[in-house]
Image (tube, rainbow, N blue to C red):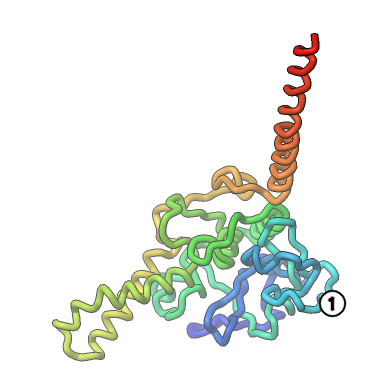
């Protein structure tokens, strides 16, 4: 990986690596955890997964053909957005990139685009894979483009870090970039009166943009805590996919009991009246 790009070849990635690829002509990137065996665990909006079973990772398209290479490609639990895909389906003919961890602040600031690196340190590969596979079975809550997206999923698997304050931007560098760019432009607007040169204004805006990204990086934030993957659902109030099914069944039983109770009361009243 170089300073300007994190592009890698397939033989360079290792189990436990945080990988990503660009979608829609570099409009955004999609992230996941490489777990070995040409398999990737990643997180997608659940609405794109409904009525799709054992299909390729072209999950935006319900008409996609099943993966010809891996029968379990596209596996997920009901009511969960965490998916197991093969590397080919994950990339969808795109290039492969590897997310960097433990970079220095100076390197972080030189990365103009967010969602490529963090100053936070990664945990051991076996821990990362354990988190990813555990979340594949138990879910990662509801998808939110700003607070709980595919990059947030991969960052948690790699670091185990969660933000205490649920308000505002999540761990995702992409989300920070989306918020940071307009914010930098707004904050630098008054400086146009002091800096008539467009170059000067552009330089200040770029600097503010980079600093806003750095301030929201999980490696420097003070509102992050380490949470074990087994305690994740309890801490955040999430329902695991299996729990969702159990809750639904319990609600059905309660509704049936409520429906039967009035009839029983009516029967008892009739018997009393006859007596």
Q: Dot 1: within a 10 Å radius of its alpha carbon, few (fewer than 14), some, or many (20 or more) residues?
A: few
**In this rendering, position of residue 205 left or right of residue 153:** left
Up-down relation of residue 98 to residue 251 (above or below): below
What secondary structure is found at the residue carrying circle 1? loop
Of the 4 image quadrants, the one containing the C terminus is top right
Q: Quadrant of residue 81?
A: bottom right
Which residue is depicted at the point 71% across and 45% down? 248
Observer-nearest residue: 238 or 36? 238
Which residue is depicted at the point 69% across and 52% down? 138
Which residue is depicted at the point 77% across and 18% down? 270
**In this rendering, position of residue 85 left or right of residue 68:** left
Q: Which residue is denoted by mark 1 in the rendering?
A: 69
Up-down relation of residue 236 to residue 25 (above or below): above
Which residue is depicted at the point 72% across and 38% down? 250
Up-down relation of residue 273 to residue 258 (above or below): above
Give the residue furthest to the left.
Answer: 194
Q: Tag count in the figure?
A: 1
Observer-nearest residue: 196 or 229? 196
The image shows residue 213 at horizontal and vertical percentages of 39, 70
Observer-nearest residue: 203 or 149? 149
**In this rendering, position of residue 20 left or right of residue 260:** left
Q: Is residue 15 visible to the viewer in this orientation of the structure? A: no
The image shows residue 56 at horizontal and vertical percentages of 76, 75
Q: Is residue 128 visible to the viewer in this orientation of the structure? A: yes
The image shows residue 44 at horizontal and vertical percentages of 63, 67
Observer-nearest residue: 81 or 221? 81
Q: Quadrant of residue 216?
A: bottom left
The image shows residue 155 at horizontal and vertical percentages of 55, 63
Of the 4 image quadrants, the one containing the N terminus is bottom right
Give the residue furthest to the front.
Answer: 274
């Amino acid at each position: 990986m170089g300073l300007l790009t994190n592009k890698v070849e397939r033989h360079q990635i290792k189990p436990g690596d945080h990988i990503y690829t660009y979608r829609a002509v570099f409009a955004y990137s999609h992230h996941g955890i490489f777990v070995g065996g040409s398999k990737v665990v990643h997180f997608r909006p659940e609405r794109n997964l409904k009525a799709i079973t054992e299909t390729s990772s072209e999950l935006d398209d319900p008409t996609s053909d099943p993966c010809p290479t891996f029968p379990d490609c596209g596996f997920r639990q009901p009511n969960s957005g965490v998916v197991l895909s093969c590397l080919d389906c994950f990339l969808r003919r795109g290039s492969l990139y590897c997310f960097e961890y433990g970079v220095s602040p100076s390197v972080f600031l030189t990365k103009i685009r967010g969602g490529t690196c963090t100053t936070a340190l990664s945990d051991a590969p076996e821990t990362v894979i354990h988190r990813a596979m555990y979340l594949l079975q138990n879910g990662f809550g509801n998808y939110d483009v700003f607070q709980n997206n595919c990059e947030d999923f991969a960052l948690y698997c790699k670091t185990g870090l969660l933000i205490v304050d649920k308000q505002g931007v999540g761990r995702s560098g992409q989300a920070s970039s989306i918020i940071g760019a307009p914010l930098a432009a707004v904050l630098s607007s008054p400086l146009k009166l002091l800096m008539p040169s467009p170059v000067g204004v552009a330089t200040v805006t770029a600097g503010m943009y980079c600093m806003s990204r750095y301030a929201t990086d999980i490696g420097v934030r003070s509102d992050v805590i380490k949470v074990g993957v087994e305690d994740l659902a309890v801490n955040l109030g999430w329902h695991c996919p299996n729990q969702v099914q159990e809750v639904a069944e319990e609600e059905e039983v309660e509704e049936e009991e409520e429906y039967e109770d009035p009839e029983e009361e009516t029967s008892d009243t009739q018997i009393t009246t006859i007596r």
